Image (cartoon, rainbow, N blue to C red):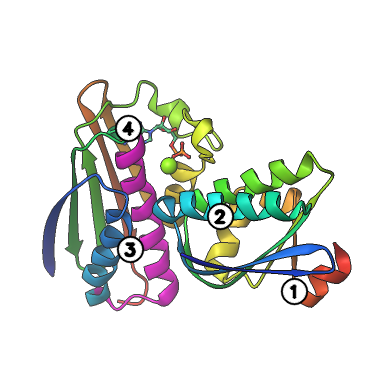
Amino acid sequence: MFKNEMKLEFPSKSVNESFARVVVAAFASQLDPTLEELSDVKTAVSEAVTNAIIHGYEDAEGIVTLRCKIEDNKLTIEVEDNGKGIENVELARQPLYTSRPELERSGMGFTVMETFMDSVEVYSELGKGTKVIMTKTFKSA
Amino acid sequence: MQLKFSVEDGCLIVEMHGELDHHSAEGARIKIDNKIEELGINKLIFDFAGVNFMDSSGIGVIIGRYKKLKDYDGKVAVVNLKPQIKKIFELSGLFKILSEFESTKEALLNL
Ligand SMILES: Nc1ncnc2c1ncn2[C@@H]1O[C@H](COP(=O)(O)OP(=O)(O)O)[C@@H](O)[C@H]1O
Ligand SMILES: [Mg+2]
């Protein structure tokens, strides 16, 4: 089996949202993805990283950890924060649910991740943080 | 994200260039709202031709402007959506509150 992995840590500044998705796209490019697959992955990463920054750390500064793993043509992406955590993950994953409507959030972040990736798992503990694990198998590779 | 504003037939056209994410959303929101207030306009066309990336933060920007204009009996339209961005619009049910047109010209005729 072909295997590769990477890990990236960065402070929770919004300017790093585009940095994170470009890094994952560059890493995923070794799987020879279609433009559509690449853009699916970038969008999902953007959602998870944005959530870590605005909900996990609520604009205080913390470290976001991004891990990617390739096993044959399957990409696994982990986005982790040590922020406030999610009280009710099931509710948080509902389409249109947002805890911060005053920020003009749409509540569609998890729905976008679920639509664009093959699987999305959320592990969260109040006061400790949140880890989102997403996978996608590339058809083209 | 760069924004270019123009006015045609009493309608504000916002040409967006770059990536619309959480980082760029706030700046875009403020600039558009200022323009709407400055011109006292209630029709808005978002031109996405120059937008090569959007995530769900973009939805918040569009819905926010829609709500603002609705108070003045206004309307919002979008043109030139790339397939990926269109998927996000469909997912969030945005086409229930605004229409997509083939071109700015067509949007102007129908708004
Ligand atoms: N990393 C996180 N830490 C804490 N809360 C989170 C995190 N990610 C998501 N949430 C919670 O889940 C809700 C839904 O997230 P999402 O679907 O991305 O919508 P939005 O970001 O627009 O609020 C958020 O409003 C927030 O309450
Ligand atoms: Mg979100």
Task: Specify the amino acid type for callout 2.
Answer: Lys
Asked if both marks, 4 and 3, belong to the same chain, the answer given is: yes
Q: Which residue is the extreme one toward the front? A: B38
The reply to whether residue A118 is in sight is no
Marks 1 and 3 share the same chain: no
B109 sits left or right of A71 in the view = right
Where is mark 3, residue-wise?
Answer: A137
- Estimate the spatial distance between the alpha carbons at disc 1 and disc 3, rounded to whole Å: 38 Å
Q: Position of residue A22 (x, y in %)?
A: 29, 66
Q: Overall secondary structure of the magenta stretch?
A: helix
**Kind of element beneath mark 3:** strand
A127 over B77 or under it: above or below? above
User: Spatial distance from mark 4 to mark 3, Cα to Cα?
Assistant: 32 Å
**Label 4 element class:** loop
Q: Quadrant of residue A141?
A: bottom left
Q: Chain of mark 4?
A: A
Q: Is residue A135 magenta?
A: no
The residue positioned 12% from the left and 66% from the top of the image is A3
Circle 2: element type = helix
Q: Crowding at label 3, few (<14), some or many (≥20) Cα neighbours within 10 Å?
A: some
Q: Amino acid at mark 3?
A: Thr
Image quadrant, ligand 1: top left
Work out whether mark 4 precedes mark 3 in sequence or the reverse, and give the earlier one: 4
